[in-house]
Amino acid sequence: MSGSASTQSDDRLRDVKLAHVPFPVTRLALWIFTLSVAFGFAYIVAINPNFGWPVVAQYLFDPTVMQGLWVTLGLTVVAMIIGVVLGLVLAIARMSNDRLASSLASLFIWFFRGTPLLVQLIFWYNMSTLFPRISIGIASWDTNDLITPLTAAIVGLALNEAAYMAEIIRGGLLSVDKGQAETAEAFGMNRARALWRIIIPQAMKSIVPPTGNQLISMIKATSLVSVIAMADLLYSVQSIYNRTFEIIPMLLVAVLWYLFITSILNIGQGAIERYYNRGDRGSTPADRTKENATPMVGAAHEHV
């Protein structure tokens, strides 16, 4: 009986579940130190009169600021839509076997990724210096009538974004196993349908995260249009502090709105990523390969 009790005791000692976990003193100390520094810094910022928090509260919802905010959001949406659509076309063209299409797409991406966005915006805004009039056939327009601050901002932001989105989409398409396209073609699907129904849905896992980052970057990049007199959020707060000389408080107004918008976008991006990655949780690479192949075969049967 004593031998049985000794065996049970040895088994308990070997049981990992009963192993003693040391108290994380170092981690607790780091948390306390980090929170102390954070609260201390927040307190200093809150009581510092030079930040002008009453002025921030006064102008946070000012009509001029809100109008600039809507311009920023509008520019972001329009530029991103154009950028994503044009980026998809460029990505497909660059992956094409047509040397001309691939070369032109590569040249576009090289130019717009290789030059600063601010330079591109100023260039579009001053297009009339190079081409005073734009003619198409017998029709002719004054360049200043076509290239307004709004059109210059949209064109500059959209073309620049298209160059980056082309590489993001191309990387996502290349991440899909080549056997998917080959199997789709074997079932009689043409290349366009296979791309739209099979390749792109599977590539979304690789495309969505960087696209979300690009959207957040676009929100901040719209502040550059203030240099071409486009009344975005930054330009609006600048117009106010040029009258009131409250530079820091008005910049804080812009910072708070940018942080608010990007925080919402971060939450949305996380939800979309979880949606596309829901099938990967708790599965092995072999399981994921099988899951990816099954819908593809079903879709191929459906569209043959």
Image (tube, helix red, strand yellow):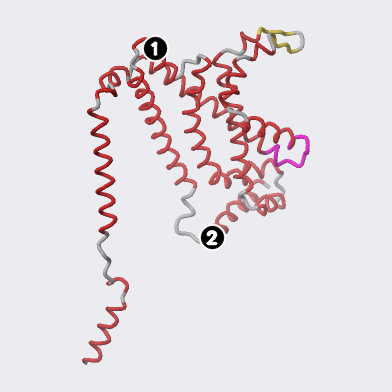
- Compare residues 158 and 302 and report the one nearer the observer: 158
Q: Where is residue 184 in the image (x, y as percent from the top left)?
A: 68, 50
Count numbered badges in the picture: 2
- Compare residues 282 and 99 and report the one nearer the observer: 99
Quarter occupied by residue 147: top right
Helix, strand or loop at label 2? It is: helix
| Residue 67 appears left or right of 133 | left
Q: Position of residue 209 (x, y in %)?
A: 50, 42
| Residue 67 appears left or right of 100 | left
Three-letter amino acid code of the residue under disc 1: Asn
Residue at the spot 55% in from the left edge and 26% down from the top edge:
79
- Compare residues 179 and 109 and report the one nearer the observer: 109
Q: Position of residue 2 (x, y in %)?
A: 21, 91
Residue 158 in magenta?
no
What is the number of the mark on residue 6?
Answer: none
- Tell me how far mark 2 sits from mark 1, CA to CA: 59 Å
Q: Name the residue under label 2.
A: 285
Q: Mark 1 points at which residue?
A: 242
Residue 99 in magenta?
yes
Closer to the eye: label 2 or 1: 1
Compared with 2, 265 (above or below) is: above
Which residues are drawn in magenta? Answer: 92-102
- Compare residues 97 and 250 and report the one nearer the observer: 250
